[in-house]
């Protein structure tokens, strides 16, 4: 009889654990925001160092930090926001990529991208209300992690960009702010 009680307790605990995971998953989904819109960079902190960590020289760092940068984002609708079209434009940068957005880092399939003559494996996923784009350089020597947060009632994106050296484990972080200038044209 004690074994039967233990089995019932274990079964009940498993069910409680499953319910908790489903509830946590639903809570994470409810925190997601629609980033759709056209945004222009208004301010950047430490962007020269971020670009320099990728191997850019003095002139390239200066140009990258001073150029006008626009992000145009189009997302599918709630509740999942599971697909995104991200256009990044400014200076030599002219990217137009579509991503399937995972429900976490382990729930996404990397896609190969060519960016300014370099190859990366890109993955995009949700971490709570943060939308993360991870770019791993083809030599696996560094990764770029771009964390987007929607602020000011949807009028500002705070972009935290991290260059993570996978050999030395050193990181360089930059924060950029993008102001919404209009809706997504799509």
Image: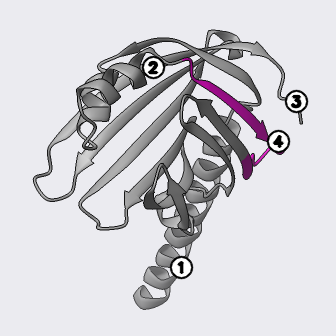
The residue carrying mark 4 is 78
Image quadrant where residue 73 sits:
top right
Which residue is at 68% across, 39% downward?
Answer: 87
**Percent of width and height locating residue 43:** 46, 10
Gap in angstroms between the C-alphas marked 2 and 4: 26 Å
- Left or right of 162 in this view: 134: right
On residue 185, which mark appears? Answer: 3
- Nearer to us in this view, 56 or 155: 56
Q: Are marks 3 and 1 in contact (CB under 8 Å)?
A: no
Extent of the magenta region: 68-84
The residue carrying mark 2 is 176
Gap in angstroms between the C-alphas marked 4 and 1: 38 Å
- Left or right of 9 in this view: 164: left
Q: Residues within 10 Å of mark 3 (few under 14, many from 20)?
A: few
- Nearer to us in this view, 119 or 153: 119
Q: Which mark sits nearer the N-terminus, 2 or 3?
A: 2
Q: Which mark sits nearer the N-terminus, 2 or 1?
A: 1
The residue carrying mark 1 is 8
Q: Secondary structure at mark 1?
A: helix
Q: Secondary structure at mark 3?
A: loop
Eyeballing the image, is 7 above or below 164?
below
């Amino acid at each position: 009889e004690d074994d039967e009680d233990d089995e019932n307790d274990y079964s009940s605990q498993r069910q409680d654990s499953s319910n908790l995971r489903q509830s946590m998953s639903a809570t994470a989904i409810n925190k997601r925001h629609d980033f759709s819109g056209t945004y222009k960079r208004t301010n950047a902190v430490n962007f020269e160092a971020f670009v320099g960590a990728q191997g850019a020289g003095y002139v390239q760092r200066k140009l990258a930090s001073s150029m006008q940068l626009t992000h145009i984002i189009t997302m599918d609708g709630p509740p999942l926001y599971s697909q995104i079209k991200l256009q990044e434009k400014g200076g030599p940068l002219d990217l137009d990529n579509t991503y399937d957005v995972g429900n976490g880092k382990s729930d996404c399939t990397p896609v190969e991208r060519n960016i300014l003559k370099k190859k990366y494996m890109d993955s995009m996923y949700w971490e709570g209300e943060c939308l993360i784009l991870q770019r791993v350089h083809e030599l696996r020597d560094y990764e770029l992690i771009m964390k987007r947060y929607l602020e000011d009632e949807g009028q500002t994106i705070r972009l935290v960009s991290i260059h993570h050296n996978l050999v030395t484990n050193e990181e360089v972080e930059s924060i950029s702010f993008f102001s919404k200038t209009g809706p997504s044209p799509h």
